[in-house]
Amino acid sequence: MNFGNMFAISLAATAAGVSLASADTLQTHRIPAALAVEAATEAVAACAKQGYRETAVVVDADGITIAAVRGDGAGSHTLDSAHDKAYTSASFKNDTIAFTERLKTDESLAQLTKVAHILFVPGGVVIKLGEETIGAIGAGGAPGGKFDDGCARAGLDKIQDRLK
């Protein structure tokens, strides 16, 4: 942005009675790295107990990876699927399992599947503090999205009571 544009914005804000210096900041929360690692580890362990080779990824509210745990024997593709499920949940502030039925009837939603890293497949679970999305966990590698969803939920359940 050049100086002229900045001056025009400042002048307009001043004329409207708004001080740019006194603008309120947004308060946001993020899932701590230690809890993210614990959740991902638990998701992988929960799947391993069922015989699944799983990967779990935890992202912050912006979809940026905080923790990734690739279980023993999990395929390389599971890193991408777990990430994309978590990214999708964080982006849309909803669990990916909620989108599976909507995809059958909502053509506009289907168009979003062409956007990079959007994956409307069960296994992405949003992490909330009250009503605020603070992250998401994605799991991939089980023989079906519903199993991935269960493992991601096991990871969230492990840390849920410590989210403050």
Image (tube, rainbow, N blue to C red):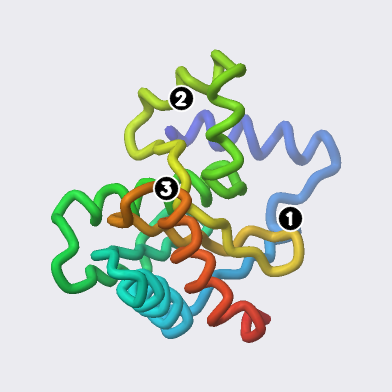
Give the quarter of the image for residue 15. Answer: top right
Outermost residue on the front side: it is: 50
Which residue bears the numbered disc 1? 23
- Identify the residue at image location x=46%, y=18%: 111
Label disc, if present, on residue 112 of the rendered structure = 2
Residue at mark 3 to residue at mark 2: CA–CA distance: 19 Å
Dot 1, crowdedness within 10 Å: few (<14), some or many (≥20)?
Answer: few
Where residue 63 appears, as percent x and y from the top left, is 44, 53
Q: Earlier in the sequence, mark 2 or mark 1?
A: 1
In what element is the residue under mark 1? loop
| Kind of residue sitting beneath label 3 | Gly
Left or right of 142, for residue 79: left
Residue 60 visible at all: no
Q: Nearer the viewer, residue 85 or 100?
A: 100
The residue labelled by disc 3 is 145
Q: Nearer the viewer, mark 2 or mark 1?
A: 2
The amino acid type found where label 2 is placed reads Leu
- Residue at (60, 18) in percent of width and height: 106
C-alpha separation, residue under disc 3 versus residue under disc 1: 44 Å
Q: Height in image: 146 above or below 39?
A: above
Residue 147 spot, x, y in % from top left: 43, 56
Residue in the picture at 51% in, 72% down:
154
The answer to which of 40 and 14 lies nearer the viewer is: 40
User: What x and y, as percent, mark residue 51?
Assistant: 28, 69
Query: What kind of element bears circle 2?
Result: helix
Query: Disc 2, disc 1: CB below 8 Å?
Result: no
Camera-side mark, 3 or 2: 3
Callout in the foreground (3, 1) = 3
Vertically, is 119 above or below 23? above
Amino acid under disc 1: Ala
Q: As drawn, is 23 to the left or to the right of 83?
A: right
